[in-house]
Image (cartoon, helix red, strand yellow):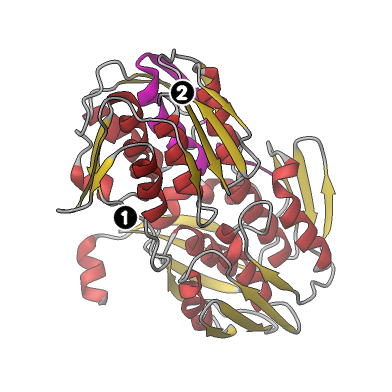
Amino acid sequence: MERIIINGGVPLEGTIEVSGMKNAALPILFATILAEDTCIIENLPVISDVADSLEILRCMGADIKMLDRTTIQIDTSNIKCGSAPYDLARNMRGSYYVLGAELSRFGKAKAAAPGGDDFGVRPIDQHIKGFKALGAVVDTSGGYVSCVCDGRPKGANIYMDIESVGATINIMLAASKAEGLTVIDNAAREPHIVDLANFLNSCGADISGAGTDVIKIRGVKRFHGVTYTIIPDMIEAGTYMIAAAATKSKLTVTGVIPKHLESITAKLQEMGAVVEVGDESITVDGSSKIYANKIKTLPYPGFPTDLNAQMGTLMSITEGVSIITEGVFDNRFRYTSELTRMGADIKVDGRIAVFNGVKALRPATVKAVDIRAGAAMVIAGLSAKGTTIIEDIHHIERGYENLVGKLCQAGADIKKEYVPDEAVLKAN
């Protein structure tokens, strides 16, 4: 087992460069199935979810070469439909993009029912609704999702009951080679959906409206390979921005698209932080007093649900009463029990959490219960004077490239430590 050890209370300073966006990288990697050709994908984040995605594609027959640590060459000409390995696919929610890509290319698809972080019920009913509208017969028995069309998928008008990012992406993939026009109404608008559309269009797709609530996909018969660069990760950037405020530091986050961060920038400014926005950088100065506030997480361009936990950590040490209302997932507040181990005063009622700010958090041994909660524990450890230990850090490494190294470069006293399994068993 590995764990992170932080000696907190040390201000951050300098610059942290953001990696490629996890939530764009995964669908784009699986979208290469549609190319039936060689693609070069640049600015991939070096995280375990990307490594697992590449292993799934390799097991399906893709020829993958690492050109450098963030660039791959992938040839999907010989992909075999329905061959995604069950154990790998079922443990990673993003693996369900195999379904849309296979359905579009082969007229059929099969993959393990998805896993990933536990945020309560996250059904794939909107994905299935979209596949059925495109003419597929869908079976969800035996731990798999299987889809079969009579020939190619057929274009359709699809109204999304909710603004589901995953379903919007999967339907875009499935419709890219469908016969005729597909219109997705009430589509999600996140930047990674735009990035996927840009990648697909670069390969020869005909997609318009990505970034709005109506996306139109005119099916094409053939794609071709391209070289494509993944956009920077707005959630990673937001995490470091919040960390600067929580540690009363001045920190510059570089390699970002500031427009993607407008909701985070605005909220930090409301709370008293000084934020300077450059062309591809944002500097946060949290040395002034930070005030209590209220947030409701919403689909983009609202405040991201993936920054709920990080902002909750900041609110835990902000004078006054702050409130977060979770507008996307049912079970985002599992991290609060870990923060209470560090002295936070938090009351949770369903999708609402009330934070009675304390003067400071206390160091403790805590767990990363999911990707973003793990990042929140790191922020908590950085702010608390003394030694904080974070366990189950494999969650963090699913979504953050070299988080420990980047924070070290910014002056944090943080390290990763390997603990033999026998020692873990004895301690428990």
Q: Residue 106: x and y, percent?
A: 27, 25
Q: Is residue 160 above or below residue 246?
A: above
Farthest left residue in view: 142
Tell me the residue at 62%/64% (across/down).
297
- What's under tag 2, amino acid-wise? Gly
Nearest the viewer among 109 and 195 is 109
Q: Is residue 357 above or below residue 26?
A: below
Q: Residue 265: x and y, percent?
A: 77, 55
Q: Is residue 55 left or right of residue 386?
A: left
Label 2: which secondary element: loop
| Pointer 1 residue | 115
Q: Is residue 224 above or below residue 244?
A: above
The magenta segment is: 15-43
Q: Is residue 134 left or right of residue 305?
A: left
The part of the image, by quadrant, that contains residue 229 is top right
For discs 1 and 2, the disc positioned in front in the rendered view = 2
> From this viewpoint, is residue 29 visible?
no
Q: Residue 33: x and y, percent?
A: 35, 25
Q: Quadrant of the N terminus?
A: bottom left
Q: Which mark is on residue 219?
A: 2
Q: Which mark is on residue 343?
A: none
> From this viewpoint, is residue 126 visible?
yes
The part of the image, by quadrant, that contains residue 279 is top right
Q: Earlier in the sequence, mark 1 or mark 2?
A: 1
Q: Quadrant of the C terminus?
A: bottom left
Nearest the viewer among 198 and 394 is 198
In the rendered image, residue 44 lying in the magenta stretch gets the answer: no
Q: Is residue 183 above or below residue 324?
A: above
